[in-house]
Image (cartoon, rainbow, N blue to C red):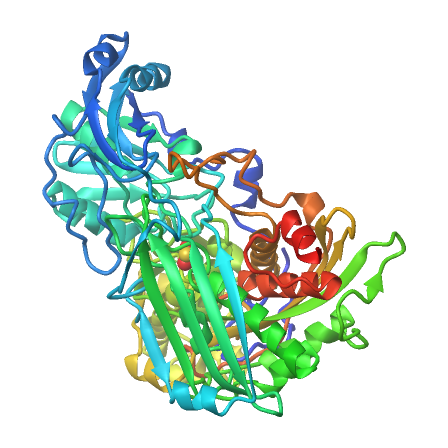
Amino acid sequence: MPLDARAPLAPYRRHGSNAGQPLTRRDGELKVTGRATFAADNHPADLLYAATAVSSIARGRVTALDVAAAKAHSGVVEVYTPANRPPLAHDPDVKLGPFGFRIEVLQDDTVRYAGQPIALVVAETLEAAIEGAALLNPGYEARPARTGLGDGERFAPAAVGVGASPRTLYGDIDAGFAAAKTIIQADIATPAQFHNAMEPHAVVAQWDGDHLTLDMPNQALVMSRDAYAIYFGVPPRNVLIRSPFLGGGFGSKAFLNGPQLLAILAARHLKRPVKYVLSRAQMYGPVGHRGRTWQTLRLGLDGDGRLTAIHHHSIAATSSFEDFLEPAANASLHAYASPAILAETQGLRLDIGTPGPMRAPGEASGSAALEVAMDKAAEARGMDPLDFRLANYAETEPGTGRPYSSNALRECYGEGAKRFGWAGRPPRPGQMRDENGLLVGWGVGAALFPCPHFAAEARATLRADGSALVETAGVDMGQGAWTALAQIAAEALGLDPERVEFRSGVSDLPDGGIAGGSGHTASAGLALHNAGEDVIARLAEIAGADPASPLFGTGNVGVVARAGRLCRRDDETRGESYADILARAGLDALVGTGRMARDEAAAQSWAMFSHGAVFAEVKVDPDLGVVRATRLVGAFAAGRIINPRLVRSQYYGGMIWGLSFALHEAAHADRRTGRIMNADLAEYRIPVNADVPSVEAILVPEEDRYVNPLGVKGVGEIGITGTVGAIANAVWHATGVRARRFPIQIEDLLHDRG
Ligand code: MOS
């Protein structure tokens, strides 16, 4: 795509004019032509195939496995069970740091959830491996499965999410409720949801002595490499992870899991490469999910419609052997101004696979409940839901009083409302009908998401021809990292993005940090930006010291890098190309490095969030209770936008996921067996195009001078957060029925009318 060099400069642009352009995806052509290779596309010579046998009970013991029958099947090479599983160098029951999980890898015969791997069969063909697994014909000693609030064991957790506090109190909560004229309560249950990435978890593992090469989709290459090195007792430099493309990660591919570890173990034991791909059904268990919650929100209100207290209590489900809890209640700590806020989480042990981070962990499920409660409070005060949110607008971070590094939420409300046509919304429910007699409702939800920064490193190499290679072990999981990160690097290098080759997705590059938490562009981006600037600074030194250069005697403050040339800032006609500078200096290449290091002081001083407001229209069939979200308008502010095309598509994806959360998605466990009844894409409902007739995302301009030197915030997860509540509130506005669980079901609407 041609670039307009005269386009207005975005803030903090030091050199070129590349960032801010809506470039198309660099990986797009590879993907649509089928040339993008995913992990399972790798077929090294002498390849073996692995399949797991998984438990059909949710709790108990495996008492028998017919290993002999499996081994007798033609093509089966080996069967691994707890009896013969080769040792690991690290105890899988001991977590590796804050991002570690206890890993199920055949350490004993205990069954802790339905779908738990109980054996691994390796064979010459995939078919033989699957048949071998079927022939194991397990016997069990089964105990009743604990599947819900009634039969699980409650516990007080040490932490929620990844290391967050399970109880946070701001102000005096009792005084807050004592000061309230009205107290409203909302009870909301959220279901188990599964990531359901199009590309299943997979690995092709190859050992060469004690060197390991892994082709696998992975959101955190260097962190995972280091973890595999520990489990297998080899130096990190012996492990290479290649993950050029991901068919979706959503948090589930950031962490190690048992099935992949087993396949790697088998490859080492058998001294042959092993391919293992989870079946769709087998992804409902050992590779994480969004855990169920049962949330209670109490809001205290004074006579003017101001919050006096927010108490958000959540019971969050986890497995019997791990502690990850959806941090839903913590979503209420940052959203609205209130003199008192209490967020508390209780754990609930069930016989399920361990939940984990899934797209907007905590924020999605927590803000869904909070936004419903806020709407109920607005109703109780007789206020317009948008006016009510503005009356409780957080000018500084609630509780801490920290200023926001930037906060254009008010503008998001304004622009979203205008575009949606919010004005004139009748206050009471059930007032609007369309031409076909369907009930029409409008709802709003606020969206916010924190801006984490992860340590990251990058390298930029300017080549003799004036083009550049930039490298970081980051991950494009479909969000467009290849493109946006290349734009950031190109800008710092003063080059057209087409002259910048971007390498990523391999663990032996400089550590690009985690692709997750909506923090990859800011984190890896800043490392790349700094690497580019490092190259330009070195180039300026060379030119300034060279009497043959038109820039001789120019200090580095006096130069600007633009379109492959280094010029005087005060006279851009005086300068020369990068290629000329390198040629005269006799250099084939000039290498710069950069890193992103979190600034603890800044993180303490500023509250850093992306913001947004989502407006939803639903239509409800008054006789059948069928709900359709007919219109979604989201307005989001996330600091500087590197690539508006990609960012808009992140917002679309988030909003559609929010719609899915509100109206479609849930995994249901059979209470008799503990098995998930809809562990497939036919019965696990997600929206299709017909469910999403109109989605608009408005990019509200925002300048952030403090969040990081690029002014970039995150955009990946925020779209989910406001949308769920907006749709639930629109359903109320259409029907008068408040959501008490997600997804909202037809029967919820029909029952409540009785
Ligand atoms: Mo996400 S849950 O940060 O991949």
Name the side, left or right, on which 647 lies relative to 293. Answer: right
Residue 160 occupies which quadrant of the picture?
bottom left
**Front position in the image: 514 or 459:** 514
Name the side, left or right, on which 281 lies relative to 599. Answer: right
Identify the residue at horizontal 62%, vertical 92% (top origin).
304
Place of residue 380 in the rendered image (x, y in percent of width and height, measured from the top left): 64, 79
Image position of 743 with respect to 681: above or below: below
Asked if residue 411 can be seen in this view, the reply is no
Identify the residue at horizontal 38%, vertical 38% (top origin).
674
Place of residue 50 in the rendered image (x, y in percent of width and height, measured from the top left): 29, 24
Q: Ligand 1 is found in which quarter of the picture?
A: bottom left
Looking at the rendering, in which quadrant would you find the N terminus?
bottom right
Looking at the rendering, in which quadrant would you find the C terminus?
bottom right
Identify the residue at horizontal 12%, vertical 32% (top origin).
209
Residue 128 occupies which quadrant of the picture?
top left
State the residue lying farthest toward the right.
Answer: 435
Identify the residue at horizontal 57%, vertical 66% (top origin).
722
Place of residue 611 in the rendered image (x, y in percent of width and height, measured from the top left): 54, 74
Count of marks overlaid on the render: 0
Place of residue 726 in the rendered image (x, y in percent of width and height, measured from the top left): 63, 65
Asked if residue 664 can be seen in this view, the reply is yes
State the residue lying farthest toward the front.
Answer: 754
Image position of 390 with respect to 437: above or below: below
Image position of 595 with respect to 140: above or below: below
**Front position in the image: 730 or 70:** 730
Image position of 616 with respect to 572: above or below: above
